[in-house]
Image: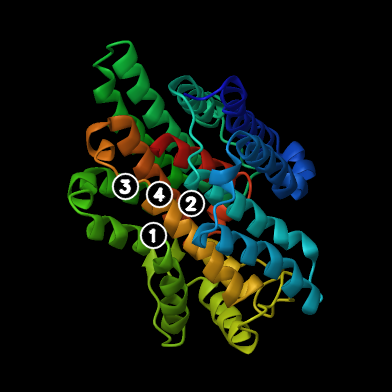
Amino acid sequence: MRNEEISKTEYIPLILFVFFMAESFIVRRVYDIISPLGTLIMFAGLSLIFIFMLKNDRDNMLKKDAVTAAGLIALIITPLNLFLIQSGKGAMLTVFDLVLMMVIIIRGFRTGDRIKRAIAFFGSVLMLLWYPVIRWDYGFNMVGLMFIILMIFGEILMEYVKNDLSMEYLKYVQPLFFVTSILLAICYQARSAALSMLVFAAVYCLVPFIMKSRPRYNICILFFTAGSLIFTWAYSMLGKTGWNGRLLYKDLLSGRELIWGELWQQFFSHPLTGIGSSYEMKNFFMFEVHNGLFDILVVHGIIVFAAVFFLLIKGLSGLFSRDLIYCPDKRLSFAGLCTLLFASFFENGFITTPYSCVFFVLLLLCA
């Protein structure tokens, strides 16, 4: 049984989640001010959880195993690499956040049903204004991710309400809400978001098949993680062929092939240390990797990436459970988790705030 201190710790993910949803998606000016501090705020919250867990069960948190070793490697090598290549040091917080997040999940941090329902509620309600009042001052990539978040937590909230209050008619509302979300993403010209929502539906339908065996589940996890790296390489190679096509309103190859091709080339020149976050792009006006895991690899190098990737796979593997088949809310949460990872094929997504906080709470909803 969890003690009172651990029960209070459960509120930290909720507080972080509400904070990031409120500051990121309601007033653009607020987001512009707080965004540079996002990874630091996330680090502070995750550190508090880690400290409380350490105080409650020191032996479990400091076990001499591969998880501890990978965490220490990432935490030590990351600032060392950034120092060696004279890069901005703020990038290390991205790695620190992801390491802390996965260690917390692996070591067994969980939240109760009330917190899960509160997360689903605030994930939906705080952004409902986006449906009647589109905020055109946000870029379409960020808005696309916002629509994904609203769709995921809206579906989960309706599942909770349907079960808790016996409102069976919501099963007819859920698919309508899903279709509406896709249409809004398309209208807002967020192609990758619309595609990610289709992935949400596919994963939800395939969960019984995926969960029939551990190997199938592992293949699914590898597709949504390692697959993103393969995607960047294949996409950049496709760009060299001269071929192109159109999807909806835009060319399929619209610039990322140049960005990723340049970054792969630079990475191969600095595989151990990475190129850091101060590298000046030749094919884009700012340093932006547009892919979550590729960002870790190219910025921090192969050693840090290997440690982070191990923790990520270890944490995701621990979610394997028959509950994902028979508990609709967990099934929706797992589909949402895969959707956010897939969206990170095209954007930094789950490694940066506010989306890293979304990733964290989805892990908790699945567990």
The kind of residue on which mark 1 rests is Phe
**Would you name the residue on which mark 4 appears?**
339
Choose mark 3 or mark 4, whichever is in front: 3
User: Mark 3 highlights which residue?
Assistant: 320
Give the mark nearest the N terminus, 1 or 2. Answer: 2
Q: Tag on residue 123? A: none
Nearer the observer, disc 4 or disc 1? 1
Q: Earlier in the sequence, mark 3 or mark 1?
A: 1
Q: Secondary structure at mark 1?
A: helix
Front of the two marks 2 and 4: 4
Q: Are the residues flagged by discs 2 and 4 in contact, CB closer than 8 Å?
A: no
Contact check, label 4 and label 1, Cβ < 8 Å: no
Residue 366: x and y in percent read 39, 38
x and y percent of residue 276 in the render?
Answer: 71, 73
Identity, as a three-letter code, of the amino acid under mark 3: Phe
Badge 1 is on which residue? 224
Residue marked by disc 2: 189
Callout 2–callout 3 Cβ contact below 8 Å: no
Q: In this rendering, does residue 291 appear at all?
A: no
Quarter of the image where the C terminus is located = top left
Q: CA distance from mark 4 to mark 1?
A: 9 Å
Dividing the picture into quadrants, the one containing residue 58 is top right
Separation (CA) of disc 3 from disc 4: 17 Å
Assign a secondary structure to mark 4: helix
Label 2 and label 4: CA atoms lie apart by 18 Å
